[in-house]
Image (cartoon, rainbow, N blue to C red):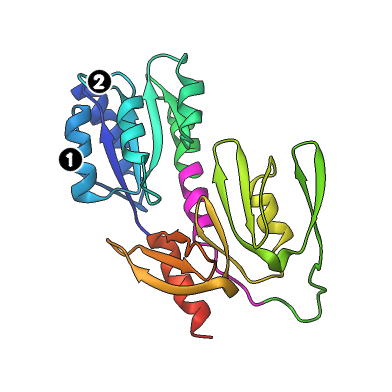
Amino acid sequence: MKIKAMIAEDERLVREELAYLIQHEEDFILCPSAENGQQLLELNDKYQPDVIFLDIHMPGLSGIKVAEKIKADNPNAPLIVFTTAYDEYALQAFDLEAVDYLLKPYDTGRFKEAINRIRKKFALEAKPFSVPDAKRSQPSKLLIEDGEKVVVVNPHSIYYVVRAERYLEIHTDQEIMQTKMTLQELEEKLRDLPFFRSHRSYLVNIEYIQEIVPWFNGAYNLILKNKEKTKIPVSRSSAKHLFEIFQR
C-alpha cells in the first residue's frame, strides 16, 4: 500500500528537508504541506493523509492543539509524528498517541526509525484475518486483569475492544472492563477466534457484526448487534480484508 504523508511546518528550509527525506521512501506519497495550524486543518480535510509530520511550534494554533482537533471524534484520524527542536513536549505527544516524536535537526537514522514505526502500524492494522486451525484448541476462558482483580471471561461474550488512553476497554454482553494489557497482546490471545483488527484502536468480534456502512474515502463503519448498536470504524487499509472474510 501507499502511505499518504503530510508535513505541517512553518520554517521553509526545515519543511523542504523533511519533504526530501519522505520523497525517498518508495511507499510514501507526499501531500501538499501546511505552514500553520489552520492551513493544516483545511488540507487534512481535503487530502485525508494517513500520517502527518506535525511541528509543535507553529503560528496560531500549536501542533498539540491541532492534533487534538484532528483526533476529536474522528476514529479514522491520521497517525501523528510530532517534530520539534525541544523535548519537553514528549509526554503530551504520547498522551495524544503520537506514533513518534522527532527532534530537529533531523537525524537520518532516527527518521528511518519513525518511518518503520509508521509502516508497522499500518501492517498491524491491515493484518488479514485467518481462519482458525481446527486442530488447535480455541480458548473457552480468558483471564483479564481488571484493576486489582483478575476476571474470568468467556471470549465469545466480547463484542469489541477499544484502546482508551492508557487502558483497553473490553465490552462484553454483561459489562465493560478495563485492563492495562496492550491491544496486540489481547489480539494474540484471541488469534484462534473470529476477531478482526478493524482499526489501530479497535478489535471486533465478527460474529456480532450486523451491518457494514460506507463512511468516506474508502473507510467504513460496522454496526454491531448489541442493544446500543455500537458503531466501529474500519480503516481504509483494513476494509479490503474485512470483505475478504465475508466472501469466504
Where residue 170 appears, as percent x and y from the top left, is 64, 52
Residue lying at 74% horizontally and 58% vertically, measured from the top left: 189
By secondary structure, the bulk of the magenta-drawn segment is best described as helix
Image quarter of residue 16: top left
- The mark lying in front, picked from 2 and 1, is 1
Quadrant into which the N terminus falls: bottom left
Between residues 246 and 231, which one lies in front from this camera angle? 231
Residue lying at 28% horizontally and 41% vertically, measured from the top left: 6
Q: Amino acid at mark 2?
A: Met
Report, in whole angstroms, how far the alpha carbon at label 2 lies from the one at label 1.
15 Å
Circle 2 sits on which residue?
58
Quadrant into which the C terminus falls: bottom right
User: Could you tell me which secondary element the residue under label 1 belongs to?
Assistant: helix
Classify 10 Å Cα crowding around label 1: few (below 14), some (14-19), many (20 and above). Answer: few
Q: Tell me: 136 left or right of 16.
A: right
Between residues 153 and 130, which one lies in front from this camera angle? 153
Magenta range is 117-131
Q: Which mark is residue 42?
A: 1
